Amino acid sequence: MSELTQSNAWLALRKHYNEIKHTHMRTMFEEDEKRFDKYSLEMNEILYDYSKNRINDETVKLLLQLADDVKLPLRIENMFNGEVINHTEHRAVLHTALRDQGNQPLIVDGIDIMPEIREELARVKQLAEKIRTRGWRGATNQAITDVVNIGIGGSHLGPLMVTEALRPYTLHDLNLHFVSNVDENHINDALEYLNPETTLFIIASKTFTTQDTMVNAETARQWCINKLGNDEYLHRHFVAVTSNVPLAKEFGIAEENIFKMWDWVGGRYSLWSAIGLSIVIAIGSDQFDQLLAGAYEADMHFRQAPLGKNIPVMMALLGVWYNNFFEAQSMAVLPYDQHLHRFPAYLQQADMESNGKNVDRQGNQVDYTTGPVIFGEIGIAGQHAFFQLLHQGTKLVPADILAPVYSIRCIARHHRALMSNVFAQTEALMRGKTEQEAYEELKADGLDEKQIKQLLPYKIFPGNRPTSTLLFDTLNAKTLGSIIALYEHKIFVQGVIWNINSFDQWGVELGKQLAKNILPELNDIEQIDAHDSSTNGLINHYKRHRPRKTG
Ligand code: F6P
């Protein structure tokens, strides 16, 4: 039995869960008029309403006790201060340093890392502004019109999500493209309409060894050479962001065009580093500063607010409550702002690559469940797709809803319609519809008793489905920075409670290793028998049926 599941707070939570598990939130709201005031928090321009959750004062007290028991405040300080908390990779975890607006030194391995961070950020901004002002010229002295970020995972999802989210702030005559999939269709779809003379590629890869990225990078290079006639001016069309400078140089990228990242920045936490180059190119230095400032505000809130008034802490604790006591397997993230349409995908990596672990920090198999399956979609689209299951399915799916109080274009007719759905969904999921209410509705619709009897069971909504709502003033760089940082910290807190390392990702290695073994087997038409019968069968079918073409 693990220390966690034997802790006083955990045992008390289990007992409390048995007492509260059938209590309906309708009753909770009826019994406590102050629920919203009690269970909502504000941080600058963000309101976090967690009152529509299956909690009462006792739940909050016990969850906070749990956070205290795992010494959360100390663990938070350890992260910010650069302790080696990623113990399996012997690394500090310092994405927070990248947005640190203070003036204190931060020592890692005996060196103050802050000057280097500022220097690299200045280089990134300098390049970005040169491109934005058409000062960067390609092989034929033409200005850059298209930038292609080649990267995957954290070297892709963060920049893509942010540039989409801040679309209204981007330059309209500079096109940004993102290529991640090693499937040739991805890069070909991008290259098809591009002119190499006016295109700049960013090869974004912390390791500079990721297969998908390197295959795409090579294709981009060949495409340039073919179109430009030689490789003499490639340095004007390729830059790199990586912590592996030698490999980037070997690829042919000029040293002055290589932007550094450090081993203490995890890929999925790296959009604040030079990996954000594509973001700076899209929105400019001032807006990027706002993004960093927003994240910094969330960092300060996380570091300073008492646990019970701390948004990421409460987000995390609620997640633990559902995950480990209600045994919810998943969590939905539902942005109602169209520009956040890549946020669920971004969060999937951030959360699932961080907390999808089954071994604790001492190397033991855990005896409790860890990170949930994160899924999501733009809320409105989800309503017309999978919300049926949220409302009437057999599974409990806690959901986070994110919505702006106003949008910068603000066409009131649209925005009111949008927001009416936000409020209605959280109310519907919480309240549901009782048998009596459904009966009265059908009766009012003029159905006779026989028809009502037939239809009634389908018209009932159990409700009691938890949602938390993040209502932010508007989606700008600063708010977005804060929102992302809040989720990063939520993930961290859950990792602390589950006693796992949220900052490694060994689970992605096995597939990579096997792909490396299989790749040479695909070079010829020889049938193979080196694997299990399914893998052999699939490979052999592929070999028999693929067109006989090389390359
Ligand atoms: O395969 C997973 C992963 O290692 C992620 O953690 C990372 O964000 C992604 O691959 C890309 O890695 P890199 O930036 O080194 O190419």
Image (cartoon, rainbow, N blue to C red):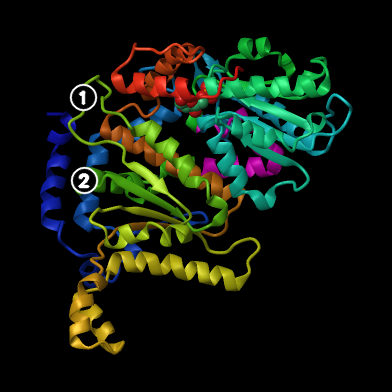
N-terminal of the two: label 2 or label 1? 2
Query: Quick one: 235 or 230, which is closer to the camera?
Result: 230
Residue that label 1 marks: 365
> On screen, 415 above or below 281?
below
Give percent across and percent down for residue 535: 35, 21
Q: Amino acid at mark 2?
A: Glu
Q: Is residue 470 left or right of residue 169?
A: left
Q: Amino acid at mark 1?
A: Gln
Q: Is residue 68 left or right of residue 517?
A: left
Classed neighbour count for the residue bearing mark 1: other residues with Cα under 10 Å, few (<14), some (14–19), many (≥20): few
Query: Quick one: 169 or 307, which is closer to the camera?
Result: 169
Q: Is residue 85 visible?
A: no
Residue that label 2 marks: 327
Q: Is residue 191 left or right of residue 264?
A: right
Q: Is residue 82 magenta?
A: no
Q: CA distance from mark 2 to mark 1?
A: 18 Å
| Quadrant location, the C terminus | top right
Give the extent of the magenta segment.
269-297
